[in-house]
Each structure stands twice: as structure tokens, then as C-alpha cells.
Amino acid sequence: MVAGEKKHIWIITAFMLVLLVAFSGCVNISCSYIPDLVITDGWYENLALKNTGSQFLGLEKWCGSVYEIKGKYPASLTVTTIKTLILTDEEELQKKTIESIEYTFQDRIRLDESTKLNGEKTILKKHNTMYIIYDGIDINRNEKIKIIGEVWNCGTSGTSIICIGIAYITNNGSPTIENTENWQKIVIDPSGTIGNFTGEGGLIYNVHCH
């Protein structure tokens, strides 16, 4: 490589670094959240698990919140907001969410692939979302669980939102009784899209992304 070519490459590299640094301050993120009025019936936001982060010189930022309920049938919902210079394709977003679910729970939950359900719905903010639902067994507690991964892009805020919810629907103290109350709280919407559970107080349905 001649000296002139080396100089040209260094100029391009330096220019790209300047652009990255300049743009890194332009990616400002507004975190999605669930309004307090919807967090009812024993649910609460676990503030200790709230997190934020960035990578690629600040060109990608994210923040996450966790909502939980304890008891015989515990459940939780994680709401993650991601901001990049270019919105991620929603199908790619769903693919990454599926991979995340299968990787995160692989050591303690056996997912039933035969019951996996894909679908779409509309939330309060009028976004069309894509969801996937799994049935499974907690192999340590021998209890049935249900998991949902739901994603969408918000053009108004320029963010991608990933919701992952898990709910226990049986308790090993009463293995023949199924309780879907906390699962319904996660997935319910006015149209009864999932399980024909109808109502306006669903956690995912009420996520505010803009």
C-alpha cells in the first residue's frame, strides 16, 4: 500500500469517528412505562431492577423497567425500550425476542413448542404489535407457566419496544388448580385478542411509548 492510499484511509477513518461522536449525542431516549393507575391488584414496579445502557458510542441506547407481583402465582413483565439511529425491522425484533426467551429460560423452564402461538393486536397507543406465547413447565418447581413476548416500533418516539411477561398459573401445593388472574393482567385487551380475556386494564395494552 502506497503512502497516498494510507493517508486516504486514515482521513476516512478519522471522518467516520468524528461523525460517530457527533451523532452519539443525538440519540436521546424516552423510556416506555406503564401508568400508575394501571399497576393494580398487587402489582408494583421493582425500581431496583430499573436499568439503562448504551453501546456503539451512544448510537444505541436502551432502558428497561420490571413490573412484578408476588404470591402463590407470581408473575412479572419486563418492558424494554431501544433507540437507534434507524428503527429495527419488527420481524427482526420479534426474532431476537424469541431467541432471548428461549435462551433466558432454558435452564429452568421447559417450553412446549407444540403450543407456541403467534399473533398480532392493537394496543392503546394504536400501535400494531406482534406477539408470541409459550406454555411451559418450571422444572424445578413442577409448576405450569405462560410466557409472552410482544414487540412493536413507535414511530412517534423513534423507539422499539420489547415486552416479555411470565406468569405462573399453577402452584405445586394445588397442582390441579389453574389460576390465570395474573396472566390475564399482563395480556388482557378490549378485543379479547388473547384467550378471550376482555378488559382495558392490561399491562402491555397500556404501555406508554410516546
Image: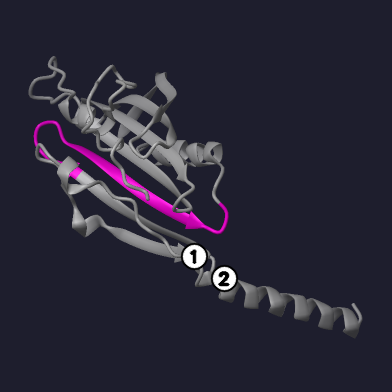
Tell whether 138 sits left or right of 92.
Answer: left
Name the one closer to the observer, 71 or 46. Answer: 46
Q: Residue at x 26, y 29 (%)?
A: 139
- Are circles 1 and 2 on residues that touch, CB within 8 Å? yes
Vertical position of residue 176 compared to residue 170: above or below: above
Q: Which mark is residue 157?
A: none
Which residue is label 2 attached to?
23
Residue 80 among those drawn in magenta: yes
Q: Residue at x 57, y 54 (%)?
A: 86
Q: Amino acid at mark 2?
A: Phe
Q: Secondary structure at mark 2?
A: helix
Q: Which residues are magenta?
A: 68-86
Q: Amino acid at mark 1?
A: Val
Q: Which mark is residue 27?
A: 1
Q: Secondary structure at mark 1?
A: loop
Q: Position of residue 185 (x, y in %)?
A: 21, 31
